[in-house]
Amino acid sequence: MQEVDYLILGAGLAGLAAADGLRERAPADNVVVLERDEVPGGLVRADYFDGYWFDRVLHLLYFADPKTETRIRRLLGDELAPCPPTAWVETGDGVVRYPFQMHLRGLKQSTIVRCLADLAEVTYVPESDRPAHFQEMLLRTFGRGMCDTFMFPYNRKMWKRPLDGLAPSGFTWNITPPDLKKVLHGALTTDTGFQAYNATGWYPRPPKDAPVRGMQVLSKALAAQAADLRLEHSVESIDVERRVVVARCRDREQEFRFRDGCLCSIPLPRAIALCRQAPEQLRRACRRLSCNRVLSVMLSVRGPRPEGRGHWRYYADESIDFTRLIYMHEFDPDTAPPEGWGLMAELLETSRSPMRPEAEVIARVKADVARVGALPGDCQIIDAHVRTIDPAYVAFTLDSQPIIEEASGFLRDHGIEPLGRYGRWEYSSMGQVMRDAYTWADQQSAASPPRTRPTTVEE
């Protein structure tokens, strides 16, 4: 058994940022990071196919606080480039800039009138009681016109379940509440001056011959700060009373005992399942927590790069399989050869639904890409790959929050801090995850004095 001051479970952004934050207070070999995959980064990784780079999912870095921004910009230096995004929303009544509610001018005139009238009604006749579910929250926030045009069809595609079965809060931090005066301005002019929450975005742009591209540049740089990162170590069990974690690397098991603290970014339902002393009632409740998986379909395209398509585009039409298309060359021109570009389609499925054959998914995406006119006539798809991310999006059902609070409380009561999008079972950005991880590390540094070295004991 190895004893350490801090044990970090998972080498995604949460675990890596926490390890980086602990470097200043603890000897390097007193912080151990365990990661089940052979490459660190979790969701923040990129795939390479014959000259084409694709992020696993759409990534754009924006910061939740100045302190985290200072840390990451110092870490990446000139390789982190400004990337203010342009995104578009395609509906059956017209194409508008993202966010939809602030740029109505691109819609049909009759649709604009309806959206404004319905927004005025919910603005000046507000409801006093709390919305009962997500669908009601959308109606009260945007009005029937905006909901029928975009909010309802897109969110049905996104969540793959009835909207009246989802909670009214928990995953709505990136929904911009409409101010009627600003919405009117956006309906009258294209130059609204509005800035979305991710307007000051950043994206890595390393030298052309760099061995890694995409947002994996960030996770690689953070991983380099972790002195004791152990890859291919899968957590098998957690003994919360003894503060012992059992991990397996190939055919060998090893035990780790943490003294000061443990950070767990393992998905919350699995973390509870791994805890030997977790009450059976809590285990059963955690199995009810819901999520969606993402199928990222990565298309290598040969031909001239399109202009004016933006960094990504949302599609409200529910007969189109993907929720959005992402243009990788807009983030970094060197993610593809000069004579080509990468196009990525994002599809959502519930994690409990059967997996479709990859060939079927690719064929459907190619057909829908042609249908929406995303592929110019002088371009050709030369390669296609599917990457499955599961879990990807946490779905907050009506009974989720009490379960999440009970499970998180159980872990914290035993010195384990759940952290990260899946560790806390929340809907959060990369900037928020790193801020929370650095905050936890700073709190640990202030709470306990540093030790000199780890010990190994026999049991």
Image (cartoon, rainbow, N blue to C red):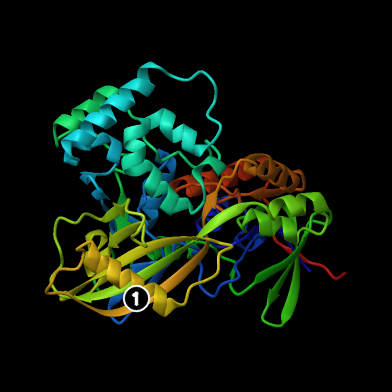
Q: Position of residue 52 (x, y in %)?
A: 29, 75
Q: Residues within 10 Å of mark 1 (few under 14, many from 20)?
A: few
Q: How many numbered marks, from 0 up? A: 1
Residue located farthest toward the right when viewing the structure as drawn: 459
Q: Between residue 437 and residue 380, name the one nearer to us.
A: 380
Q: What quarter of the picture does the N terminus occupy?
A: bottom right
Residue 353 appears in which quarter of the rendering? bottom right
Regarding mark 1 in the picture, which secondary structure is present there?
Answer: helix
Q: Position of residue 264 (x, y in %)?
A: 64, 55
Q: Position of residue 29 (x, y in %)?
A: 63, 63
429 is higher (above) or lower (below) than 364: above
| Camera sees residue 211 | no
Q: Between residue 427 and residue 319, name the one nearer to us.
A: 319
Q: Position of residue 53 (x, y in %)?
A: 32, 72
Residue at numbered disc 1 = 363
Residue found at x 74% / y 73%? 254
Q: Is residue 140 left or right of residue 230?
A: left
Residue 99 appears in which quarter of the rendering? top left
438 is higher (above) or lower (below) than 102: below
Residue found at x 40% / y 65%? 216
Residue 184 appears in which quarter of the rendering? top left
Disc 1 marks which amino acid? Ala
Residue found at x 31% / y 56%? 203
| Camera sees residue 258 | yes
Residue found at x 52% / y 36%? 169
Q: What quarter of the picture does the C terminus occupy?
A: bottom right
Q: Is residue 182 left or right of residue 357?
A: left
105 is higher (above) or lower (below) than 240: above
297 is higher (above) or lower (below) than 240: below
Q: Is residue 364 left or right of residue 332?
A: right
